[in-house]
Image (tube, grey):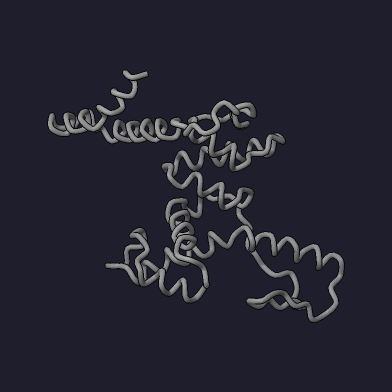
Amino acid sequence: MNSLITLPSSKILISPVGLQIHSQLTLEEWHSLATSIGHLARSVGFIVGDWLVYGQSLLGMEGQPDRRVDADAYRIAMEATGLDLSTLQNYAYVSRSVPFSVRSESLSWEHHRLLAKLPEDQQKEWIEICLRENENGERMTTRRLRKSVNLGRLANPEEVTPDNSDKGVENHIPYVNRLAVWWKRMKQAEFLANATEDQRAAIKRDLKPIVSIYNEL
């Protein structure tokens, strides 16, 4: 279960420009403060993102919390937080895409961002893999997680190390994997059983560039 973040002592004041300690701290209190500061630093993306998504339930049409955050919400957020639009959009995207119940405080916001594009069941699977690897002493860095998600399996250390021969060559694997994930979802939705001939023909037409690339190789 994820823990709550609380300040460990009433001797501490936090303002927009820093932290003030107005009474002498013990060594134990100082250590406890470091833990809370660390939690706050790692959690700011989730905190701001959840706030934005909730705000959309107040500002959006018919109180739909899953609608995209609109311009009014972002304007309010930029004025209130001083953060730029791109940062706020990223925070909202992750908070909207990764349910609170799925998140793990043992992983960074960036880990969750890499999983945001996946279905919830796959998010859970990858988070469990990350936690298991960390427990086994095989630290799951964001670089390794990105590579693993693109491969569709856990990447080994050799695969995470850049290959000098690949410098300057754009990696095609992420695009192939996205296409494979898309087709998997289509089949799970029983597209093949329900599609019309026109729908099948349209997709075949759109996929012709892929066949052309394959044939050129």
Which residue in the rendered view is the most extreme toward the front? 168
Q: Is residue 78 above or below residue 185?
A: below
Q: Quadrant of the C terminus?
A: top left
In x, y percent, where is residue 152?
A: 48, 31
Left or right of 3 on screen, residue 80? left
In x, y percent, where is residue 15?
A: 66, 78
Residue 54: quadrant of the picture:
bottom left
Q: Is residue 19 above or below residue 46?
A: below
Residue at 65% x, 35% y: name it: 133
Q: Could you say which is closer to the camera, residue 160 or residue 66?
A: 160
Residue at 42% x, 32% y: name it: 177
Left or right of 68 on screen, residue 151? right
In x, y percent, where is residue 46?
A: 53, 59
In x, y percent, where is residue 62?
A: 27, 67
Residue at 46% x, 47% y: name it: 116
Q: Could you say which is closer to the camera, residue 129 or residue 1?
A: 129
Residue 143: quadrant of the picture:
top right
Which residue in the rendered view is the most extreme toward the bottom? 22
Residue 164: quadrant of the picture:
top right
Left or right of 209 on screen, residue 56? right
Left or right of 76 on screen, residue 157? right
Q: Could you say which is closer to the camera, residue 45 or residue 163?
A: 163
Residue at 43% x, 45% y: name it: 117
**What number of labels is visible?**
0
